[in-house]
Amino acid sequence: MKVLISDKMSSLAVKVLDRYKDKGLTYDVKTGLAPEALAEIIGEYDGLIIRSASKITADILAKAANLKIIARAGEGVDNVDIPAASEKGVYVTNTPGQNTVTTAEHAIAMMMALTRKIPLGTSTMKAGLWEKNKLEGREVFRKTLGVVGLGKVGRIVADRARGLRMNVIAYDTMPVSEETVKELGCEMVSLDELYARADYITIHVPKNAGTLNLINRDAFAKMKDGVFIIQCARGGIVNEDDLYDALTSGKVSGAALDVFVVEPPPADHKLLKLDNVIATPHLGASTKEAQENVAVAAAEQVAEYLTGGELRNALNRDKVKKG
């Protein structure tokens, strides 16, 4: 049984696989492969461990003669063609919950940096300027934070925001228990009410057909003037053209973006030219702790399945074709 690690990740993944050598498990670490190069060698492997860089397309899966499992070290699997994997008889797993604290903390950090204009202050000081009068910020104390998506990440954001003494309102398409709402100290509202009341809106929903372009021109029209947008979920949930218009018109005071429709975004992306936009290169899960957690979890999933048949967190468990 042979495993390929095709993306850069914590060395702890290799240490996990080493524990299974006496059960016949071997592995290769080959990162940065072009799609053609990955397709050329994928047929050698029974298991594949990836992060977000490797794009596992139907063409690559067509050449995966021996592949049985793909483990994504992280939660999002939009870089894997899951229907094609299911058709090929390959399970696709992810590692939910391993980076939720890290992602939530990043959203809070982005909110604070945006509010106090920290990136702009840093860049102007490094340019030899002292523009204190142009860098007036706001307090988040007693402001209303609207959390769109009260899942694992959204709940941690809500909890941390309450620690900052913010008023927290939240919307989710799924029912949230009264006990959870009470514990978080937040208020569940409709999406339109959230738009109307929130001083800050932070997005924590998955990207799917129902959330694509969720935050669009119509949504911005329903928001308070001067709202701040925090986007650390998935690119495409916020319509970038409509956000640009809202930022340049003054409807939105500022936006903090960790994700984009196209990643990396082009150097001349119009949002990145605005002073009231701060951005990071999809760093939501990028802490040492989170990367160790997801690497270990993904390696364990592959090793346990290949050596003992134990299958955890399979996203296509009921759709995989076995022949």
Image (cartoon, rainbow, N blue to C red):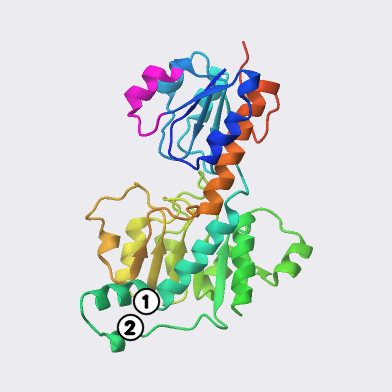
Specify whether 247 is left or right of 58. left
> How many residues crowd mark 1 within 10 Å: few (<14), some (14–19), many (20+)?
many
**Residue displayed at 41% across by 78% down:** 116
Q: CA distance from mark 2 to mark 1?
A: 6 Å
Displayed quadrant of residue 299: top right
Residue, x 46% and y 50% (percent of image)?
A: 234
Q: Nearer the viewer, residue 208 or 162?
A: 162
Q: Is residue 21 among what the camera can see?
A: yes
Check disc 1 and report its element: helix, strand or loop.
loop
The answer to whether one can see residue 189 in this image is no
Residue 43: x and y in percent read: 45, 15
Looking at the rendered image, the quarter that the N terminus falls into is top right
Residue at image location 41% in from the left, 65% down from the top: 256
Quadrant position of residue 242: bottom left
Image coordinates of residue 219 in percent, x first then y, are: 46, 63
Residue 135: assigned label: 2
User: Label for residue 202?
Assistant: none
Name the foreground residue: 116 vs 172.
Answer: 116
Q: Which residue is mark 1?
A: 117
Q: Is residue 216 above or below residue 115?
A: above
Q: Residue furthest bottom?
A: 133
- The reply to whether callout 2 and callout 1 are in contact (CB within 8 Å) is yes
In the image, taking residue 275 as reference, residue 104 lies left or right, namely right
**Nearer to the camera, 61 or 304:** 304
Mark sitting earlier along the chain (2/1): 1
Q: Residue furthest top?
A: 323
x then y, percent, for residue 293: 59, 46
The range drawn in magenta is 30-42
